Amino acid sequence: MTLRRLRAMGWRPWWVALFFVPLVKFVFFALLCVVPSRDRTVGPPTERPGGDWLKALIPRGAFASAVVALLVSLATAVTAVWLGTAVLQDYGWALFVGLPFLTPLLAVLLYSFHERRSFGDCMAVANAVIALAGCGFLLFAMEGMICLLMAAPLAFAVGSAGGAVAYYIQKTFWWPEESGRLFCIVLLAVPLTMVVEHALPPPLPLLEVKSSVIVGAPPERVWRNVVSFSELPQPQEFLFRVGVAYPVRAEIHGAGVGAVRHCMFSTGPFVEPIEVWDEPRLLKFSVTHNPEPLQEWTPYRHVHPRHLEGYLESKGGQFRLVALDDGRTLLEGTTWYHHRMWPARYWQVWSDYIIHRIHLRVLNHVKQLSEEGGA
């Protein structure tokens, strides 16, 4: 049905690929509903209500139309981010894929309303929307620099795709008389999708990160430094120096199952009740309290976006010690966690990397203590 509709409108058949793109396909379906079929139009298209006021609002000059397009798109982006993060408290597909796709698309369509623009100009406007929106989130204290940098690769990639789609729209089948409907679809698609996503949240996968080192000491000595360890030196890794939380020391109250271990981080403690105490082979624990995952870089004294509370949450972990034949020990650390941000695969790349670096900071410290004979 989608392919037949494309043929009726005179679009290229490869547009049917958008049928398989999450979220974007709903905007695609809306376009298929409002764009007229080619065989229904004889001669110049008839002017419809809404065209005149848009022509009056959008300047004809390239620079002036670009400014108006950017202002409208930025206002849309800031409003949608406020709705998604402050009101609905969701960090999902609509925020990280829908919004970066639709706001550049809207900007390019506004920019090319009066005349066709080149591909380079359209892509410049599309990427300017993403860059200026990031600056706006920083200046309005909606986000910090670290999270904006993490989201930037996805945002610019999706925004470029939105700009490219808008370029082909204005090049091949852009009718200004249909603009009122099209702009309404673009403006309403993101907030409506956010509401649906909030009402029907996707399931949370339990993710696992596993890291290991070889320690030149027997398991009995390594075990003592796993259960609790002394103050770590100040981190030299760039990741931790820019604000990502890092481990400082560990202490334990009691011994055996039921003891409570506290792993102190730069932003607060992880509280870890012991579930398995198999000395000197396995120490397994749950996590009942998580500190903030990072301290944001910001021009203000303090910024506290919603995703710092429970959106990256450790559920449990373990240390496994395996005695090797040559008297050394394989020390393996594992963390199980949730994160409530989508697309899950994209954010998992960041979270897995951060947790792996945290593991290595602890494991290498335990390795150094054990090989020096300290406890």
Image (cartoon, rainbow, N blue to C red):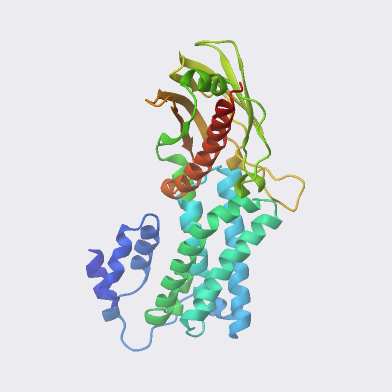
Q: Residue at x 66, y 46 (%)?
A: 241
Which residue is at the front of the view, 83 or 272? 272
Q: Residue at x 54, y 77 (%)?
A: 111
Q: Quadrant of residue 208?
A: top left
Q: Most extreme residue toward the bottom, as rendered? A: 43
Q: Quadrant of the N terminus?
A: bottom left
Q: Quadrant of the C terminus?
A: top right
Check the image and report above or below for 224 versus 309.
above
Check the image and report above or below for 311 versus 36.
above
Q: Quadrant of residue 362?
A: top right
Which residue is at the front of the view, 114 or 284? 284
Check the image and report above or below for 116 versus 218.
below
Which residue is at the front of the view, 44 or 92? 92
Q: Most extreme residue toward the front, as rendered? A: 326
Q: Position of residue 334 (x, y in %)?
A: 45, 31
Q: Residue at x 43, y 74 (%)?
A: 178
Q: Position of residue 368 (x, y in %)?
A: 57, 31
Which residue is at the front of the view, 263 or 202? 263
* Numbered disc total: 0
Q: Position of residue 92 (x, y in %)?
A: 48, 47
In the rendered view, does 157 fall on the left or right side of 247? left
Q: Position of residue 216 (x, y in %)?
A: 49, 29
Q: Is residue 186 visible?
A: no
In the rendered view, does 165 fall on the left or right side of 146? left
Q: Is residue 325 visible?
A: yes
